[in-house]
Amino acid sequence: MYSVTLRNDVLDQIKTDHGIRSDRELAFRIGISGPLLSQIRSGRRGVSAAFITGMHTILGVPFDPTGDGLYVLATDQEEAA
């Protein structure tokens, strides 16, 4: 089984590039709640489809968990380590 997590450093750079000053503003712009974004950032929740869709549709961020982008694809075994 695989899960998708975020690279927070890349997310912060994307926010800067788009003139977004806060996580709350980012959440609003991509159509998710602030608490959900906080949970995704901290790793308590996996990246949601709404997050991926919003980041791609609104900000043009591609979904490529195999590259050096925003997302990291991990297996259950990697998460346990």
Image: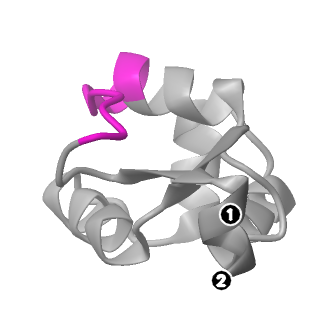
- The residue segment tinted magenta is 56-66
Q: Amino acid at mark 1?
A: Gln
Q: Position of residue 63 (x, y in %)?
A: 35, 28
- Quarter of the image that includes the N terminus: top right
Question: CA–CA distance between discs 1 and 2?
Answer: 7 Å
- Residue 57 sits inside the magenta stretch: yes
Above or below, comparing residue 77 to residue 32 in the picture:
below
Residue 7, picture quadrant: bottom left
Report helix, strand or loop for mark 2.
loop
Q: Quadrant of the C terminus?
A: bottom right
- Classified by dominant secondary structure, the portion drawn in magenta counts as loop
* Rendered view: 41 above or below 54: below
Which residue is nearer to you in this view: 18 or 7?
Answer: 7
Residue under numbered circle 1: 77
Q: Would residue 20 appear left or right of 25 to someone viewing this image? A: left
Q: How many marks?
A: 2
The answer to whether marks 1 and 2 mark residues whose Cβ atoms lie closer than 8 Å is: yes
Where residue 49 sits: x, y (%)? 67, 25
Q: Is residue 7 left or right of residue 78?
A: left
Display coloring: one colour
Residue at image x 60%, y 67%? 78
Numbered disc 1: secondary structure:
helix
Residue in front for this viewpoint, 1 or 30: 1
Q: In percent of the image, x 68 and y 69: which residue is there?
A: 79
